[in-house]
Structure formats: structure tokens, C-alpha cells
Image (spheres, rainbow, N blue to C red):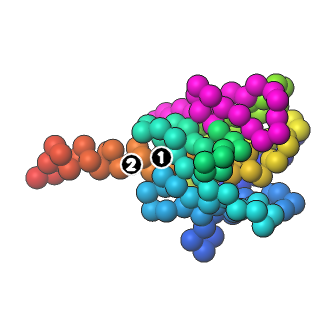
Amino acid sequence: MPPTLTLTKSHGSYVLEGTAGDASLETGKSMRRGEITVSGRTLPVEVNNPRRTGITVGGSSPVLRLDHQDSFLPGSGKAVQWELSRSFRGYRAAVVSGGDRIDLWLPKFHGKSVEVKVDGDWDQLELVALSACFAVLSRRRGDAFRAMAVAGATGHGH
């Protein structure tokens, strides 16, 4: 059975549970930017497109990118695929590299934790998992902001 990790909110930040090391994610209210900390190393993370379907880690010298068009992982020469979708129930995402796969699940409304299922051998697993979690959380926040804007613009409820 593949290991399952969980990203949960704790004292204002997100913590990746189920790993051997210390791994956390700090975000702003809009979830367009944040910081990923893995074993004492902190890296900036930000959304890299208006629809919030991809992210870049490392600022001006990216070390990781998850994007439908152009994804790469640190130290990996293997091809990487990034998938992020939403349904009525929630958000699903996957990072796929060769035969290795990380699947993520986040409920649409009531859920502050992201379920992360890991299959295969991943270099810098915590960094990859936290990056993917940030992308999923950011997408959900963006969808919520768009829904509020539409409701406000249409005068719903007045």
C-alpha cells in the first residue's frame, strides 16, 4: 500500500504529516504566494498563471515548476506531468514522473486538509508534495474569489 501523507492547518500554517522530516507551508490570505520550508530550508512559492493551475518554487531561479505546459522537478532529468482538475466534489491533482505518481485530493468546500497518496520513489518528496498542495489550495481559493465576485456583480440576494 502506498504511503499517505496529509497536509493539515496548524497554528496558521500548513504542516505535512506522515514524513520523517519537518515540512511546512506558509501562505498569504489570497494564496497567490507563500513559503515552503523543508528541513530548515525555505523557498518562495507563487502562482504562475491567472487561472491558478500552476506554480513555481524558487523565485527568480526556479527549482521546481508544476504547470500543464512546462513542469520540472529538482534534480530530475525525467519528464514530469502535472494535472489539476476540479469537480462538483472537490479538487484532484497528480504529479507523474515515469512510473512514479503523487495523487492529491481536496474537498471543494469543507476541508482544510489535503490528502496526498505517494506511489514510487521521489527525490525531495516533501518539497514536491508541498508544492502540489499549494497549487491545489491556491486553485480552490481562486475559484472561491471568482464565485464571490460573480455573486456580488449579479446582486444575488438583493
50 on left or right of 118: left
Q: Residues within 10 Å of mark 2 (few under 14, many from 20)?
A: some
- Residue 144, numbered label: 2
Residue 19: x %, y % from top left? 83, 57
Check whether the beta carbons of the residues at disc 1 and disc 2 lie within 8 A of each other. Answer: yes
Quadrant assignment, res 30: bottom left
Look at the picture and state if 13 lies above or below 96: below
Q: For the N terminus, which image quadrant?
A: top right
Residue extending furthest bottom?
A: 11
- Label 1 belongs to which residue? 140
Residue type indicated by callout 2: Ala
What is the distance, in whole Å, between disc 1 and disc 2 at their CAs? 6 Å
Residue 143: x %, y % from top left? 40, 44
- Residue 107, numbered label: none
| Residue pictured at 29% horizontal, 50% vertical | 148
Residue 121: x %, y % from top left? 89, 38
Residue 16: x %, y % from top left? 72, 59
| Residue pictured at 71% horizontal, 44% vertical | 63
Disc 1 is placed on an element classified as helix
Asked whether residue 106 appears in the rendered view, the answer is no
In magenta segment, residue 109: no
Highlighted range, magenta: 66-89
Q: Nearer the viewer, residue 106 or 133?
A: 133
Look at the picture and state if 151 lies above or below 14: above
Asked whether residue 88 appears in the rendered view, the answer is yes
Q: Residues within 10 Å of mark 1 (few under 14, many from 20)?
A: many
Q: Nearer the viewer, residue 57 or 136?
A: 57
In magenta segment, residue 71: yes
| Residue pictured at 16% horizontal, 51% vertical | 157
Quadrant assignment, res 117: top right
